[in-house]
Image: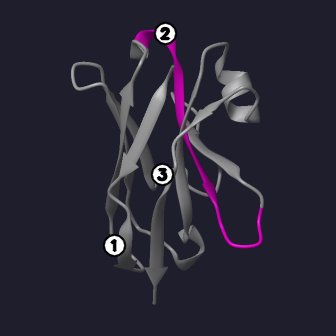
Amino acid sequence: QVQLVESGGGSVQAGGSLRLICAISGEDMSELYMGWFRQAPGKEREAVASFPKYADSVKDRFTIIGDRAKKEIYLQMNKLKIEDTAMYYCAANRESSSRLWAGSGNYWGHGTQVTVSS
């Protein structure tokens, strides 16, 4: 069973940076398609980044990084905006990047909160 545990969230001022971490257990990373999603209050969960695709809203600001030796993936978030405030989730899919992005059959972590203030 794939287990995902996120950390690294917090509060930051607009323009600042955060690095989210997702620790993976129960499966070899090479067997999974990995990515990050987020859900803001009152909004649906949306895909943010996978290897190597990014949502338009975060392109050129966020970078997804993987470390197979540590069994972790990261989301480096720079130039944060107030609208980036959300719960961020790590996700994994056994089938494809397309299914991952569509949220179909994903394994999910419990999330880590990111709050960006002015």
Mark 2 or 1, which is nearer the eye? Answer: 2
- Report if residue 14 lies within the magenta region: no
SS for callout 2: helix
Q: Residue at x 39, y 12 (%)?
A: 28
Q: CA distance from mark 3 to mark 1?
A: 14 Å
Q: In the rendered structure, are the residues bearing label 3 and label 1 in contact, judged by CB atoms less than 8 Å apart?
A: no
Q: CA distance from mark 2 to mark 1?
A: 34 Å
SS for callout 3: loop
Residue position for label 1: 16
Residue type pointed to by label 1: Gly
Relative image position of residue 73 (x, y in whole percent): 37, 34
Figure quadrant of residue 38: bottom right
SS for callout 1: loop
Q: Residue at x 40, y 47 (%)?
A: 6
Relative image position of residue 77 (x, y in whole percent): 40, 57
Give left or right: position of 36 versus 55.
left
Using the image, tell me which numbered label, if any, was put on residue 31. Answer: 2
For residue 53, above or below residue 57: above
Give left or right: position of 27 versus 85.
left
* Residue furthest out toward the left: 69
Label 3: how many Cα within 10 Å (few below 14, some 14–19, many 20+)? few
Residue position for label 3: 60
| Numbered range of the magenta stretch | 30-43
Mark 2 or mark 3: which comes first in sequence?
2
Relative image position of residue 3 (x, y in whole percent): 46, 30
